[in-house]
């Protein structure tokens, strides 16, 4: 079959590689001038900045793509373990060093709150059971309600109706440790106080498989996957934005795509790695969407957006780890402002990424490359980013300088800022959401937009908005699901 893949993010590349491995003729059409989608790479003034995901937690999903073609991952990209996984810093000055060694995690818990050690051990044991059940679902398609009914007993047994925060709080009492072991849903666009406790499996995932980094940055993984795809005979075209998915209204099948310049690319199947809501509402004619109507798409709950400052300094900050989680003065209240009230708060919690801690080549000698990320409401709120972007940037830089990075303002020699408008306008993400459909129980598995469209038999979805969800393991698995569905159909 001839298959068109819209978008070259991790989900699209994973699907495309597996499809060409099956023997299909595959072409990727990408809106931007470089591949990667959210994993776009910015290069300026001698500094390299990964535009999107920087935490690799399931390296076997990357290696599997190469091994299926008899290739060695090491010949394409170098993945190295990160230690510690994160430094988690609190405003009282305490720092939790989060590693993959259970005894070290126990020592850190003991240092923070000795009375919570026993609770942590019970928590860790409980996440093992969640991991076993949850990971079995990560590459399983949910196309029929019977697929969901099959897993309901496990969800009931594991109390998936509870939030991650409620799950953690049932074992741990120290308020800082409660944050340490519940923040992970934020990495996939979820509110720890609303995301299902199934997402607590990330703790075991990290402990068992580690946190990894690609030398050269996440963009090096994208380049490696593109190289593999092209070696296998696939075609990737840049600067090709899709204007419409063409559908035969009689057969209700996609026949290809029309590009913004008018060119038609014919196809026997179409895979969208674009935002699910925008794909349906902007690219698929409303007349053929009986199930996935505008009303349904608008009625879903969407994850938060992000405000990100990429910056390079003319000095090194060697006391900053590769991954830093900087907790602000509020936790639940801040998340309520972001997710429910859609209000831009005056305080923030931050993720600070310093890849030059591991790979100095990403900045000039003696310098550092950073990005700092703040979760913010999506564009369903009333924040005027034209007015607020500057002051919000200044507040974050001042906070970093005052608490963690002395002399920062004078040390920044290059920078780039993105806000929710970037996700809406450049990444075509509905409401400027950074992670698409919010990961709550009633929007998971069968309840999430399906990997195969219910409206159009040969239209498929890979990426954050479909099953199993956002995060690198999720989107890579979505590509695997799509390839298997197409393989079964053809």
Image (cartoon, helix red, strand yellow):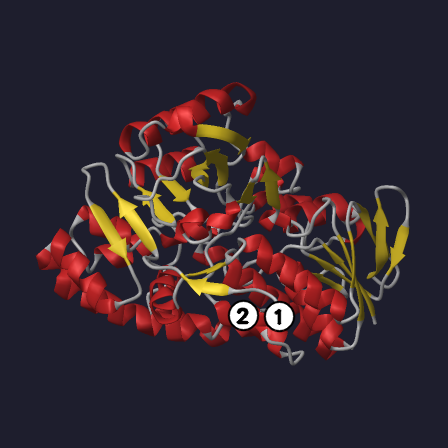
Q: Is residue 157 visible?
A: no
Which secondary structure, mark 2? helix
From the image, tell me which residue sits under label 2: 61
Residue 208 in percent (x, y) is at 36, 71
Q: Is residue 157 above or below residue 291?
A: below
Q: Residues within 10 Å of mark 2 (few under 14, many from 20)?
A: some
Q: Earlier in the sequence, mark 1 or mark 2?
A: 2
Q: Nearer the viewer, residue 488 or 320?
A: 320
Determine the residue located farthest toward the bottom in the rendered image: 70
Write the residue at 45% across / 29% down.
412
Distance between the alpha carbons at the discs numbered 1 and 2? 9 Å
- Contact flag, marks 1 and 2 (Cβ < 8 Å): yes
Q: Is residue 23 visible?
A: yes
From the image, tell me which residue sits under label 1: 480
Pair 1/2: label in front: 2
Q: Residues within 10 Å of mark 1 (few under 14, many from 20)?
A: many
Where does the N terminus fall, quadrant-wise?
bottom right
Write the residue at 53% across / 65% down.
78
């Amino acid at each position: 079959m001839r298959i068109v893949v819209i978008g070259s993010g991790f989900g699209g590349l994973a699907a495309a590689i597996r499809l060409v491995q099956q023997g299909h003729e595959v072409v990727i059409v990408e809106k931007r001038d470089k591949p990667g989608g959210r994993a776009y790479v910015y290069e300026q003034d001698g500094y390299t900045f990964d535009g999107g995901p920087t935490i690799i937690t399931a390296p076997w999903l990357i290696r599997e793509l190469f091994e299926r073609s008899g290739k060695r991952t090491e010949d394409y990209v170098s993945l190295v373990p990160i230690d510690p996984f994160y430094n988690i810093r609190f405003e009282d000055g305490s720092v939790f060093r989060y590693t993959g060694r259970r005894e070290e995690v126990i020592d850190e818990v003991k240092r923070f709150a000795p009375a919570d050690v026993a609770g942590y051990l019970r928590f860790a044991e409980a996440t093992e059971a969640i991991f076993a059940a949850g990971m079995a679902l990560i590459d399983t398609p949910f196309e029929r309600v019977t697929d969901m009914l099959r897993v309901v007993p496990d969800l009931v047994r594991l109390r998936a109706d509870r939030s991650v925060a409620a799950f953690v709080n049932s074992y741990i009492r120290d308020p800082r440790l409660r944050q340490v072991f519940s923040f992970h849903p934020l990495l996939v666009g979820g509110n720890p106080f609303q995301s299902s406790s199934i997402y607590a499996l990330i703790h075991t995932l990290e402990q068992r498989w580690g946190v990894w980094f690609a030398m050269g940055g996440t963009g090096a993984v994208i380049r490696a996957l593109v190289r593999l795809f092209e070696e296998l005979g696939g075609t990737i075209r840049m600067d090709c934005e899709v204007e419409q998915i063409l559908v035969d209204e009689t057969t209700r099948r996609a026949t290809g795509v029309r590009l913004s310049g008018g060119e038609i690319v014919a196809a026997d199947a179409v895979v969208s790695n674009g935002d699910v809501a925008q794909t349906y509402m902007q690219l698929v004619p409303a007349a053929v969407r009986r199930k996935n109507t505008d009303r349904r798409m608008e009625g879903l709950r969407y994850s938060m957006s992000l405000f990100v400052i990429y910056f390079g300094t003319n000095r090194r900050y060697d006391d900053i780890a590769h991954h830093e989680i900087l907790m602000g003065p509020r936790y639940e209240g801040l998340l309520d402002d972001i997710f429910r009230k859609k209000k831009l708060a005056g305080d923030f919690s931050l993720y600070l990424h310093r890849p030059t801690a591991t790979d100095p080549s990403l900045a000039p000698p003696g310098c550092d490359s950073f990005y700092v990320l703040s979760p913010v409401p999506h564009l369903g709120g009333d924040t005027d980013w034209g007015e607020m972007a500057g002051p919000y940037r200044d507040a974050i830089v001042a906070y970093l300088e005052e608490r963690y990075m002395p002399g920062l303002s004078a040390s920044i020699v290059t920078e780039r800022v993105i806000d929710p408008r970037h996700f809406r306008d450049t990444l075509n993400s509905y409401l400027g959401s950074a992670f698409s459909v919010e990961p709550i129980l009633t929007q998971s598995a069968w309840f999430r937009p399906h990997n195969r469209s219910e409206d159009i038999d040969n239209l498929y979805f890979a990426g954050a908005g479909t099953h199993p969800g956002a995060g690198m393991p999720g989107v890579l698995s979505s590509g695997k699901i799509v390839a298997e569905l197409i393989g079964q159909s053809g």
